[in-house]
Amino acid sequence: KAGVTQTPRYLIKTRGQQVTLSCSPISGHRSVSWYQQTPGQGLQFLFEYFSETQRNKGNFPGRFSGRQFSNSRSEMNVSTLELGDSALYLCASSLSLQGGRETQYFGPGTRLLVL
Amino acid sequence: DQQVKQNSPSLSVQEGRISILNCDYTNSMFDYFLWYKKYPAEGPTFLISISSIKDKNEDGRFTVFLNKSAKHLSLHIVPSQPGDSAVYFCAAAKTSYDKVIFGPGTSLSVIP
């Protein structure tokens, strides 16, 4: 079974631009969560989508948004990029038959650098 | 406001010895805890979990202990192997459908 895939793997943008990251979950998985990883902060939860609906949301500004398609693939968008948005963005999927108790499977991440 | 804390950013252990990684949480509503391991350039992978109704869970060389009164959990790796060198994240959740909150991670180095 193919794992979670994220595209692109690396991205360089400049301040003020916007970016869209993509995540394809494991086949059959219905929940997709997004995390931001920065040094010293660990994994900060952005949001979770389940059946095309946002089920949980973290404490990030409205510049961070996401969506999920009917095939469970998910995208996240960051508008008006700031230097502090430079981070590794991780996507995780789970079956979500039992909700948050299930193991999340992570993709390799997209490394975003904002100049 | 960090609800899940890992106060040791790094830890070095000799091969064959025990590694103990600690995690503290502040929210008494958390009832499910997980440990993930992350190698460079890879996403985190699930290691072991524990429900609040238990105080210990074991899987091979990995054991997680939970002390609810102290709001503390620890991951024991015995014996430690060089391949265990990675960043370990502690995580917690409140309910079945709640978001999972991760700690900042502890970088473990197992020295041959």
Image (tube, coloured by chain):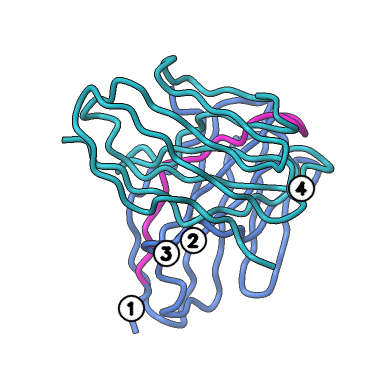
Chain colours: A cyan, B blue
Q: Secondary structure at mark 4?
A: loop
Work out whether disc 4 and disc 1 sit on a shared chain. no
Q: Residue furthest right?
A: A97
Q: Which kind of residue does numbered mark 3 sit on? A: Tyr
Residue in view at x 64 percent, y 47 percent: A93
Look at discs 2 and 3 and give the one toward the viewer: 3
Query: Magenta segment: does it hold A51?
Result: no
Give, as a single range, the part of the protein colored magenta: B95-109
Cα distance in 3D space between marks 2 and 3: 18 Å
Question: Circle 1 is placed at which residue position?
Answer: B111
Residue in view at x 71 percent, y 43 percent: A71
Q: Which kind of residue does numbered mark 4 sit on? A: Leu
Q: Tell whether label 1 touches label 3 (CB within 8 Å).
A: no
Determine the chain carrying the residue at label 3. Answer: B
Instruction: Examine the rendered structure and indicate whether residue B11 appears above or below residue B94.
Output: below
Determine the chain carrying the residue at label 4. Answer: A
Q: Tell whether label 3 touches label 4 (CB within 8 Å).
A: no
Question: Circle 2 is placed at which residue position?
Answer: B20
**Crowding at label 3, few (<14), some or many (≥20) Cα neighbours within 10 Å?**
some
Residue A95: image tag: 4
Residue B25: image tag: none
Coordinates of residue B39 in the picture (x, y in percent)? 42, 64
